[in-house]
Amino acid sequence: MTDGDSLTGVIETLRDVLQLEPQRPLEPGSRLLGGIPEFDSLAVASVLLAIEDRFGLEFDDEDISAELFETIGSLADFVDRARAGTGESYAGGPVAEFIDAGSGRLFALHRGASDASRCVLFVPPFAEEMNRVRPLVTAASVALNEAGRVTCLFDLHGTGDSDGEFHEARWPLWLGNVHDMVERLKERGFATVDLAGIRLGGRLALDYAARRQDGLGRVLLWDPELDGRRFLERFLRARSMAAMMNGRKETVASLRQRLLEGETLEVAGYRVSPALATDLDALDEARVPDGIPVDWIARGDTAGPAADIGARFVQADYPAWWDSVETVAAPALIDATVKCLAA
Amino acid sequence: MTERRALVFDCAGIPLVGVAELPVNPAATGLVIVTGGPQYRSGSHRLFTTIARSAAAKRNAAITFDFRGSGDSTGDHPGFESLDDDLAAAIDALCTASGVNRVVILGLCDAASAASMYAARDSRVAGLVLLNPWVRSEGSLERARVKNYYPARLGSAGFWKRLLTGKVRVLHALRSYRQQAGAARAAPRADDFVGRMLAGVRSFTGPVLLVLSGQDMTAREFSDLCENDADWRQTAETRFDRHELPGASHTFAGHEQTDALVGLVTEFLAKLDS
């Protein structure tokens, strides 16, 4: 849970509510009751309400005592404790944390109201596509929250803020990350976890659902990349093109050969290990697992699903965000997502 | 030992998401990393996460974060010319979490521009790391192209073919180059962001590390500005500790380039702490 910013927040709230002069020093040790003349019983109530608003908290009357208001530090500690309590129940704004998983710590970001029984877990796409989709996941999460769903976004091992390096990634390790996240969400009281798999993350979500379905609701795919071999080739092409621009010749076939021979290759700054390449090559035909409904959202100009895996196909009109270096909005994708997951 | 902490902190009522690296016994200077353009806090190929972790390994506390309307943070994107509140909030967050009270701001591309405009306003900012600062105007791009791109292409048959079929507007480019070369000699106006950057850097008293990538048009435009504009030239000569990484792309892709950059940044921090 956040901690230091409780103090900053409390100090700013006090300044606002009590209309204190900016030059008056406020520190953790500053006395409140008896120390600040403006701090009377009416002010206590106003400050508490302002703190509730600011941090999305609700205090119980029995939690409130005079000791809380001894110093700014004691009040900030109280807020810290109250906020730590809400961390698990997702009241109010986003909660960011590191989760201990089998492969190390995973970064996770939760959004949504505390009383939801169903959580949508986003399974991120590969390499730079993960960076590009970030604002779209934020927008989709906010929309899903409004429709009563709690959401969770996490970083796979070796990506984003999670532990490890990209070149350590293996497909089974990433599947294990999905498993650890689903289990953690179930432990926290969600009866059902839906997976929203993005691009190659869609393949990961399907593979996970094919293995374990306990507590799993629906699977949603955003423009899934189901063919690992083809996806890898297209990824390698980025390096091949960059080499060409610099007057060097590196064919996709030659890059593939180097991977086969055990070389770790850097593509657009991402180090792809021969092991991960082998994993991607070895992915068999994707399929919809029995008993799990799967929705496949694709861009409007797509003729149909690239593979008939038994998913419900949903078309929407939005740009190919994964190819765009600029941030793009995709309201139709967000709408379709809410319809699929929170209808 | 370093604690890695996920943070949510307030900026004008919007919760910003960040990750702080908190060494147990931190050095005096913290590092606040600001992403440029549409990127989120971890950066292309995790550049900023790598820098933050490397700084922390040398006992410098560090934070990466998403400003309003970017990455994991909600709200409306204020634009790089108006990032002051977001920068202040991130500095608050790092200082409170780590206990340090002075920081270096590191920014890439338009975040370097934002950092230049902000630095002198906050006494906690002890240094700046500017990576390929963004100073693009219509003219600066044309100028950098004329100077760096077209000459390299003059030997190519394809270039002449496209020129003759009108696909390269070389006259247009040369014309605007001439205009801009004239305009660049005039003092920058205080209301445009490049002027605000210059004013910001000039009123800032701490050390400034400038790192330019060799394979990057944005870096070339900045380098041209420092050559052609008298005020920038003087500032560059007297204020910047300037380094060029000839093989580097705009985002310092590839572990050799990333390592070289990390080396420069950690050295810069160490010097401030010594």
Image (cartoon, grey):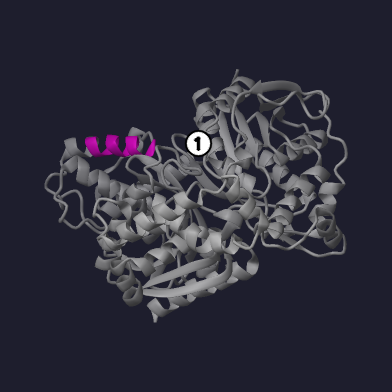
Viewer-closest of B154 and A84: B154
* Residue situated furthest top in the rendering: A343
Q: Nearer the viewer, residue B69 or A168?
A: B69
Q: Is residue B201 above or below residue B9?
A: below
The residue closer to the viewer here, A114 or B32, is B32
Q: Position of residue A231 (x, y in %)?
A: 77, 44
Quarter of the figure with residue A188: top right
Q: Helix, strand, or loop for circle 1?
A: loop
Q: Which of the chains bears the disc numbered 1?
A: A
Residue B112, picture quadrant: bottom left
Name the image quarter holding residue A194.
top right
> Which stretch is magenta?
A46-56
Q: Is residue A318 left or right of residue B85?
A: right
Whether residue B272 can be seen here: yes
Question: What is the chief secondary structure element of the magenta stretch?
Answer: helix
> Residue B229 at x, y = what percent?
32, 66
Q: Residues within 10 Å of mark 1 (few under 14, many from 20)?
A: many
Residue depicted at x 75% and y 38%: A225
Amino acid type of the residue that numbered disc 1 sits on in the rendered structure: Tyr
Q: Is residue A152 left or right of residue B218?
A: right
Quadrant showing the C terminus of chain A? top right
Height in image: B3 above or below A87? below
Q: Quickly name the residue at label 1.
A: A90
Q: Position of residue B183 (x, y in %)?
A: 30, 57
